[in-house]
Image (cartoon, grey):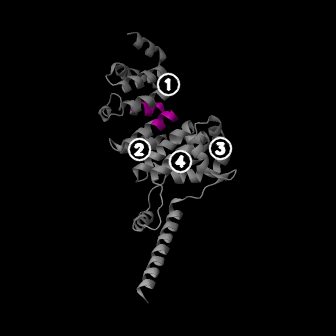
Amino acid sequence: MGARMKRKAAIIYVVACAGAVVGLLWICVTPHEPTYEGRALSSWMDDYQNSPDGAKRGRAEAAIQQIGANGLPTLLRMAGAKDSALKSKLLVLAHKQSFIRFRFKTPDYYHARATYGFGALGPAAKPTVPALIGLLQDKDRQVRASAAQCLSLIGPEATDAVPALIQALNEEGNGYGPVLINSMVALGAIHSEPEIVVPLLLEYVNGPRKDWNYNISAMDALGRYREKAKSAVPAILPFLSDTDEGHRFSADAALCAIDPQAAAQALKK
């Protein structure tokens, strides 16, 4: 075989390998999705999240709701997305070739996509709560943060997740911020079991976890409990005169939601 034929054979081999790698990556990173009116769920979620046109956004929300339960497996897959060992190896191989260029999606991309769908479905996504509770215990901290955020979008219908969210706060310690913040947001959105959750959140306001700097998230969550969080008022009041504007704003909003009378009296001083 001549040198020219060898080069041609080598090029064909490399292109074939590159094509195989891209094909495998496509299988690994492109989930199969349900459709509505000929458009995939992700396409509708793009409109729901990004469109400045209210009418277009409304159509997208209605489309996601029409897909409904059929879209929940896709949303859960997105919420729990992470790079597998196989995908990581394929990406290394893909970067070693230069014949085919492509953009691959990161887990963060899919986590964000999941929130669009859960945001549109809200309480209708309740059937996913057990699976999201499972994701809250995943070894991947980004997956845990994603699960907590999705639970916050389901709202009060996700009340079964409260013990797991409390566990997430306690196990995370002063660790990965998104898990802590998203868990607080979820607890506030669900606003159940105040006898357990309010004292826990207060640990971040004036308790042993105050110096972890999650005061704002804790006060925002307490505000969602409204009058059920009245015991938090004495701890929140000092933040009205805090040097940090964010602290003052969150304290005022929380007090107005929990005890409007106490907030009005504090403003008069």
Residue under the image location 41 percent in, 38 percent down: 181
Query: Is 186 included in the stretch rendered in magenta?
Result: yes
| Label at residue 114 | 4
- SS at mark 3? helix
Residue 69 location, x and y as percent? 64, 49
Q: What's the distance in space between the residues labelled 4 and 2, CA to CA? A: 20 Å
Discs 4, 3 touching: Cβ within 8 Å: no
Say which of 62 and 223 sits in front. Answer: 62
Reading the image, the residue beneath label 1 is 226
Q: Say which quadrant the C terminus sits in.
A: top left
Q: Which residues are magenta?
A: 185-199
Q: Quadrant of residue 121?
A: top right
Discs 2, 3 touching: Cβ within 8 Å: no
Above or below — where is 142 with respect to 262?
below
- SS at mark 4? helix
Residue 233 appears anywhere in the view: yes
Q: Say which quadrant the N terminus sits in.
A: bottom left
Residue under the image location 45 percent in, 85 percent down: 5
Q: Which callout, 4 or 1, points at the residue further toward the start of the chain?
A: 4
Q: Is residue 194 left or right of residue 234?
A: right
Above or below — where is 178 with respect to 253?
below
